[in-house]
Image (cartoon, grey):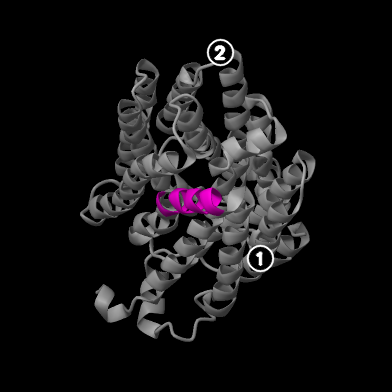
Amino acid sequence: MRQRVGSVRWGIAVLLGIGVVINYFDRTNISVATKPLMQAYHLTPGQMGILLSAFGWSYSFLQIPIGVILDRIGVKWLVRVTTILWSLATFMTAIVSGMGLILLSRVLLGAAEAPAFPSNAKAVGYWFPLKERGLATSAYDAAAKFSNVVGVPLVAFIVMGWGWRGGFYATAILSLLYACAFWIWYRNPKEKRSLTESERQYIAEGGAQDEGSAPGGVLRNLGYLLRNRKVWGLTIGFAAYDYAFYLFLTWLPGYLETQMHMSVLKTGLYTIIPWAFATVADLFAGWITDFFIKRGYHPSKTRKTLISIGMILGLAVIGATLTSNPGVAIVWITIALSGLSFAAPIGGSLPSIVAPKGTVGTVLSIMNFIANVMSILAPIVTGFIVGGSGSFAPAFIVAALVVLIGLFFYLVVMGEISPIQSPFMNRTSDDRVHAGL
């Protein structure tokens, strides 16, 4: 069937995935440069934690406005503009001097990259039927992990040869190239000339989200969704994953360099291991979810079971607190990060499944706002715990407790994974117009 209907939609998935790889190069380059930056500016672990979290400040607090904008103007133009802006912010980080200006550069980068995941999820909602939504989500979610497989050692090599600024110059150039690629190739399904009529029909009949704005208007839908238990269940569940994920994303190189006393280059090589396994786990989660659902297993029970398995494996981070051997620690971290990565694409696909028509961006913005508050807290809390205790062990235990809370919200609070019924769908067209912005 897939052969007959075409595969343009999978080309879109690859384009989105490449964007996330480069997007995460820009996020993680500062993690690789942790030790050189601390030495250059005489930073304490707590101060470095603040610097590592700066990206998350604007990234998090712009999520809800970005979701509203995304649902009104769509994926194409929002990503075109913001991709150019995030390229310029990365160039700025390489050029400026002093902690204050570097902090500002990271805040600007967070603002420019804020639409990345909401836009990708909305694009997947447009382009993919429900039974392919798991693997399609994994195509870009796994890219976040894969970027560390290639990005961390690549940036480490550049930092060793050309200093920490060289890492930012390199990733800025890649970002600018991707901005050009997205501008040329991305279109929504109704605009894509290479999309055959059979593939267009296959996407639509499979439950893809309709393009267009939500009945009832943006603000009414936002208020309704903020009161919905299902939205808060998936939001807090994903936020717990994000806390642990950002701990590893921002502090794993620093952990290996400081507590395990590794060089920058050796840290880059060791870091490949957990992120490589995490990439495979992410892709496998998307495939196995679609596999079971296509064979008639209950969609909600399947997704909740697989999420639970991943979150439970994430508790393995506690194992890293029991050893001083870097090889053993990496094994435990690999198990934990792989488990969390297994849960991630399933959790990330939920907004496009449960959101009422035209509100995928809004549901995603609520989820991403809370989740990315965790991206601020994780590096700061970890930095101060490490600075106060001299060890990463208490920080890893805190992460495990947060994951347990997330598991509770997924299993108990969220309820069945099914579409939320909008109270505005049956309003008259005049009422819809009156209710809109």
Determine which of the numbered discs, if any, sits on residue 389 in the image.
Answer: 2
- Magenta segment boundaries in residue numbering: 149-161
Q: Quadrant of residue 12?
A: bottom left
User: Which image quarter is the C terminus in?
Assistant: bottom right
Determine which of the numbered discs, if any, sits on residue 394 in the image.
Answer: none
Position of 240 relative to 273 (above/below): above
Mark 1 falls on what kind of element?
A: helix
Position of 354 relative to 340 (above/below): below
Near mark 1 (Cα within 10 A), the count class, few <14, some 14-19 or many ≥20, is some
The location of residue 419, given as percent across then percent down, is 46, 50
Relative placement, left or right, of 134 versus 48 is left
Q: Earlier in the sequence, mark 2 or mark 1?
A: 1
Residue at 37% from the left image edge and 39% from the top image edge: 270
Near mark 2 (Cα within 10 A), the count class, few <14, some 14-19 or many ≥20, is few
User: Which image quarter is the N terminus in?
Assistant: bottom left
Relative placement, left or right, of 170 versus 408 is right
